[in-house]
Image: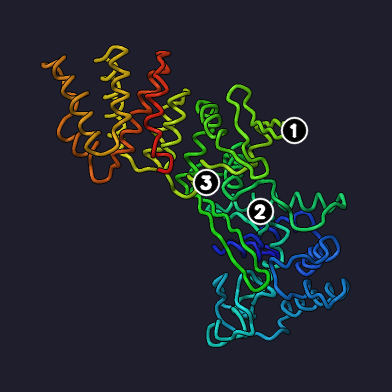
Amino acid sequence: MNEIQKYTIPTGDPFADIGGYAIEEISKREKQKNILELIEYVTDIYVEKWDAKINPFFLNSKITQPAFNKERKKEETRKYFQSLLDNSAEHTFGFCRMTGEETNLFPAGRDNSILSGSGTFVNFHHFFETGIMISKEAIIRFHFIPIACELLQGKIALIHSSNPDLTKLFVQNKIKRNLADVGRNISEGILKSEYKSPGTALFRFIDQIIQEKEEIVRDKTSSLTLYQFTNFGATPEIKIYNLPDSLFRFYQMTQRIKYREDWNKFTAQYYYNSEYKGAKWNNTSGNIEWNSKKESLNFTEKDYQSWNNRIYNKLLNDQSILFEIRKWSSKEKFDFEIVEIYQIGLRNMKSETINKINQMTDLIFKMNDDDGIRKAVKTLSGARSNYDLRRFIIKDVVSKNYKQNPDGEPALTVEEYANYLFSDSNSSLETRDVLLIAIYQKLHERNMKIDDLIIDEIEEDESDE
């Protein structure tokens, strides 16, 4: 193991890992530099290019110390890290809480690590120590975090993954942009994200993976976690946004050629930007249009894909988007397979339930003429409770099928009724909605139109599901 490699071994700690991968990436570009020279390299960027504005990361560090001029900021930083490397700084011996190694341990506080306690509050730390006792390798990793992150909504954001290759990819993106700006002499501080929300940032990151590096997520669990934080002043805080592997796989599926157009058109209407209140998506042009007294603007997909999105936010918060899909499906074609995969993969609906819903949909169309189908939609749309849905299925599907075909297969068995449509794990409203969506899609296939008044009845009082 060479000198640099010991700083890049994954630890499971998001901050240590981001810093480690930053060291690895920069060392590829600056191959002749040892670790102290790499520390000096990023220190020069922080001090000379960024005017020492890394306060959201470190409070009262050598770099952010206002009493020091630029040269002293750099010199004090170099001396501090030199004292870690040669073990001349005060230390103890034990197990590092970041790497798990048994080694020399040095105190880490808010001046040299992320979101740890202040040294003045000794009762915050174990055994009244002056900080979290960690290895010099961990502390050095922290120093490289600023160049591998970005500002999102005014706070620092970084993405960490259960798949180390994805964490590396995030770091590589930020390092590449930062060093390119440094090379062009336009780097003035921490990178500013083009995205308006954590949800959008996460899903756009998946887009990049799909387009450029899809092979690194094959056969690997690839959950993502976005950490949004500040370590500045008296009110440090952190927000954590988790995107589990199941959601990663679902979104990845929506971007396949077969489904991409349907999914992207559906989600496009839910982009919003506080700067352009009242902006609306135009289904014909595929743009978002905004009008004011002074001007009118059209935003293309490339523009609005950086905005906040209600669908992404609901997915990220594990909230159902079935209401929005149902509303969209009543007016537009939407591949029902997306609904099936969503319900089974993210909403834990049994595949047998989906199969039964598809069978009932076929029966409804088989047993009814156009007027009968419209009446069925109206009745089903008015089903607001478990009782209403049961009544519809028994009367309009099971009984009707028996009357028309008494010697044929039953529309529903007792087992299917109890285990797949009305089991304890099922939501009757979700079952109703999936059935409605399936019917809507068959209507689109047959170019049949249902009166908007019938469809709109169901929207009343349900917009906040």
Q: Earlier in the sequence, mark 2 or mark 3?
A: 2
The location of residue 35, given as percent across then percent down, is: 75, 67
The Cα atoms of the two marked residues, 1 and 2, are separated by: 28 Å
Residue ID at (48%, 41%): 249
Residue lying at the far top in this picture: please name it.
369
* Disc 3 versus disc 1: nearer the observer: 1
Q: In the image, is 173 to the left or to the right of 410? A: right
Residue ID at (27%, 24%): 359
Residue ID at (62%, 65%): 16
The amino acid type, in three-letter code, at marker 3 is Asn
Secondary structure, mark 3, is helix
Which quadrant of the rendered structure holds the N terminus? bottom right
279 or 78: nearer the viewer = 279
Question: Dot 2, crowdedness within 10 Å: few (<14), some or many (≥20)?
Answer: many
The location of residue 5, given as percent across then percent down, is: 66, 62
Q: Mark 2 — residue?
A: 152
The amino acid type, in three-letter code, at marker 2 is Leu
The colour scheme used to paint the residues is: rainbow
Whether residue 355 can be seen here: yes
Residue 313 image label: 3
**Which image quarter: residue 444?**
top left
Secondary structure, mark 2, is strand
Q: Earlier in the sequence, mark 1 or mark 2?
A: 2
Q: Mark 1 — residue?
A: 295
